[in-house]
Amino acid sequence: MNPWFERFTAALEADPAPLLDREEARLLLDLAGAAARGAGARQFAPLATYLAGRVAADAAYADRLQVIRAAIEAAAAAGPAEEPLGID
């Protein structure tokens, strides 16, 4: 998708290197935005995105996209975070 991500995944030494296409990237950014807005704190965005990625990791492509779409809805529906993240 992008040379920076190619260098990044190469440095992770994953075999095979994970691929990220434009549709997945768009959905993941939508998820991060929904998580930050829904929780009311941007710190929740990367963590929610990571958790969705763990759920989607072993799924086929179409199923991964569906997991991410469901995660966007879940992030929007979860409501505001009423307690701090607690990892300072």
Image (cartoon, rainbow, N blue to C red):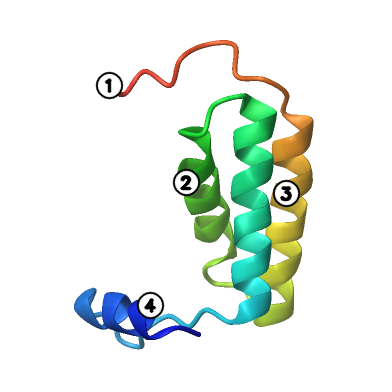
Which residue is identified by label 4?
5
Helix or strand or loop: what does disc 2 sit on? helix
- Give, as a three-letter code, the residue at label 2: Pro
Instruction: Answer with mark 3 or mark 1, whichever residue precedes in sequence.
Output: 3
Which residue is identified by label 3?
72
Which residue is identified by label 1?
88
Residue 75 position by quadrant: top right
Which residue is identified by label 2?
46
- Give, as a three-letter code, the residue at label 4: Phe
Residue appearing at x 76%, y 58% in the figure: 69
Q: How far across and how far down the image is residue 44, in percent?
A: 51, 34
Q: Which mark is residue 61?
A: none
> Residues under labels 2 and 1: Cα distance?
15 Å
Q: Are marks 2 and 1 in contact (CB under 8 Å)?
A: no
Residue appearing at x 52%, y 79% in the figure: 20
* Vertical order, 47 against 14 (above or below): above
- Crowding near the residue tagged with mark 1, few <14, some 14–19, many ≥20 C-alpha atoms within 10 Å: few
Q: Nearer the viewer, mark 4 or mark 3?
A: 4
